[in-house]
Image (cartoon, rainbow, N blue to C red):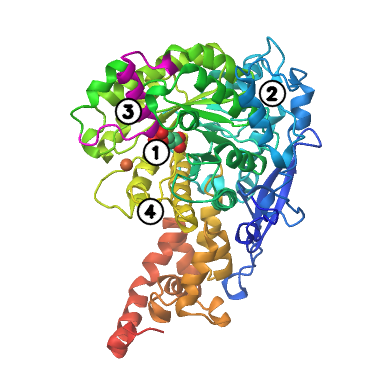
Amino acid sequence: LSDSATVDAASIKPFPGSKKIFVQGSQADILVPMREISLADTAMELGAEKNPPVRVYDTSGPYTDENIVIDLRKGLAEMRRNWIDARLDTEYLNEKSSLFANQRARDEALDRLRFNHKRKIRRALAGKNVTQMHYAKQGIITPEMEYIAIRENMSLQQARAQGVLEQQHQGMDFGANIPDEITPEFVRSEVARGRAIIPANINHPELEPMIIGRNFLVKVNGNIGNSALGSSIEEEVEKLTWGTRWGADTIMDLSTGKNIHETREWIIRNSHVPIGTVPIYQALEKVNGVAEDLSWEIFRDTLIEQAEQGVDYFTIHAGVLLRYVPLTAKRVTGIVSRGGSIMAKWCLAHHKENFLYTHFEDICEIMKAYDVSFSLGDGLRPGSVADANDAAQFGELETLGELTKIAWKHDIQTMIEGPGHVPMHLIKENMDKQLRECGEAPFYTLGPLTTDIAPGYDHITSGIGAAMIAWYGCAMLCYVTPKEHLGLPNKDDVKVGIITYKIAAHAADLAKGHPGSQLRDNALSKARFEFRWEDQFNLGLDSDTARSFHDETLPKESAKVAHFCSMCGPKFCSMKITQEVREYAANLGADLSAELGEALGEESVVRMVDVEAEMATKAAEFRAQGTKLYSKV
Ligand code: IRN
Ligand code: FE2
């Protein structure tokens, strides 16, 4: 990062029509950010009414807060510092960390923290366990848990007040049992039960806490990271701010090239969302890319180095067992996981069991001293629909279930990674098996891609599978960009990937009946029906694109109040016609309306009374104007 490094302007642009608000919890420093989108009044002729602002979940952090100036060299404010200190179970490490087997590696690591040299590193006091799960099991509600309860409920109050709860369709949550309201106690109980995790390393005090579990809003992860071929530190930080702007709930830094430690330091210090990594990638760098040269000692040092930096969750491919590797031999696409292939190679080269598996309890000892969560890697996930749900994949999943129970014995928060490429009819079996094998630990899947025939469009092939599995109970979706299988995603790809996955996640929230989740849909639909164009744009996941698509054909300001768009033109706008239909119905004899209304309910009146008459008028208009109607307006 150069001295002049500044936050990417496009990432910090405030959202149109929106402001950041904070809802306070039981302590003055529990301030939960939300985005509030303000709406215009309904026009006079449509019944003149005020439309209350809509609150939406905000993943964009301090970057979209106009009152905060961010200096990337200093990093973000340490919001959680007092919460962590108040628990009195951590200490600041001095220069002689006993955990660090290799003192030189530690010194080098410290050297590389150039921009924030004074940042102190925390660790649990000897004998203490500082995980959120550990507190939860003892009945303690942490500030993180309370923060999350407020955050998850952001739409509930408004939905209640506006009658959306009654309008919202009954969800179908496949036995998840989502409560009517998310309370701090509910958050605690879900974490204690292992059904949800709060990735929150004690060395990441800049974090805005969030939760991953199937009784909560479905979350989205965005991957960033350089590779040997391209991308700079600045670009990676920019991808973080850009990805979270569009809705990434967590970010994984998958860097493999040079400056791996420094890149990560920049990312974590400037990240308000949990950061995940795959530590075996960095361990492999340390042995110059020769998988056979990996060892438990090198891996352990890497884990500690990253835990001390503040990584919130680790992908660990501990389920790739020696005996599963031959099961991939006849696959169409073999092993497609990077971590999985590294471990498979190591196992075969040494003809030994995976050291991540044999040292699993040692890994747990490290994780609980920092509260790093497990994301147990699916190193044997299918890389083609042909390989879906095969013996290698499911064998690994069973092992991940066994490891989950060991992690829980240490009170380590754990989620399970899943596929991959799976055709639609085989998706549910994945979710059901995962819940069964892993004691309902949260599932975190990569898509799945439902077909292999659309390179260039794999955000869509996978968005379909993601929506399905999220509905069935998957807690977090790892995004796939249009560049999947083809190249490193750029900024546009990151945005398209995140938005695609937000759609899948929200569609699942609706289908599961998450309380109040329909608030934004209803508000947007009402704006659309009332031709409040600006509101329609601003309520959308991507208002910029919505606005520019609209303006492509009707750029004039006056079109922003027009009661039609260029898709159907003024005469064929169904919404406009419906409004005319309603007016027509309203003007009919009050007696007739009342009489029919009692018998059939208001909606039916509109349908019965006037559709025929209206159709006749429109038919006459249509015949009179002929093909002219199809020309652009
Ligand atoms: C998510 C679910 N299954 C895999 N993932 C993600 O894939 C994981 O979280 C990480 O971002 C990446 C790891 O890839 P490899 O090493 O398994 O290919
Ligand atoms: Fe793939």
> Disc 2 beta carbon < 8 A from ligand 1?
no
Q: Please state the horizontal and vertical placement of residue 173, each as a whole percent of the image.
A: 43, 34
For image coordinates 69% across by 45% down, the residue present is 33
> Disc 1 beta carbon < 8 A from ligand 1?
yes
- The type of residue carrying mark 4 is Pro
For image coordinates 29% across by 32% down, the residue present is 335
Circle 4 packing at 10 Å, graded few (<14), some (14-19), many (20+), is many
Element marked by disc 3: loop
Residue 175 sits above or below residue 600 on the image: above
- Tell me the CA gap for discs 3 and 2: 37 Å
- The type of residue carrying mark 1 is Leu
Which residue bears the numbered disc 1?
A: 446
For image coordinates 25% across by 37% down, the residue present is 425
Task: Give the residue at the far left of this rendering.
Answer: 330
Question: What segment carries the magenta color?
Answer: 332-357
* Tag shown at residue 380: 3
As for residue 339 lying within the magenta part, the answer is yes
Which residue bears the numbered disc 2?
A: 141
Q: Earlier in the sequence, mark 2 or mark 1?
A: 2
Left or right of 12? Residue 540 is left
Which residue bears the numbered disc 4?
A: 482
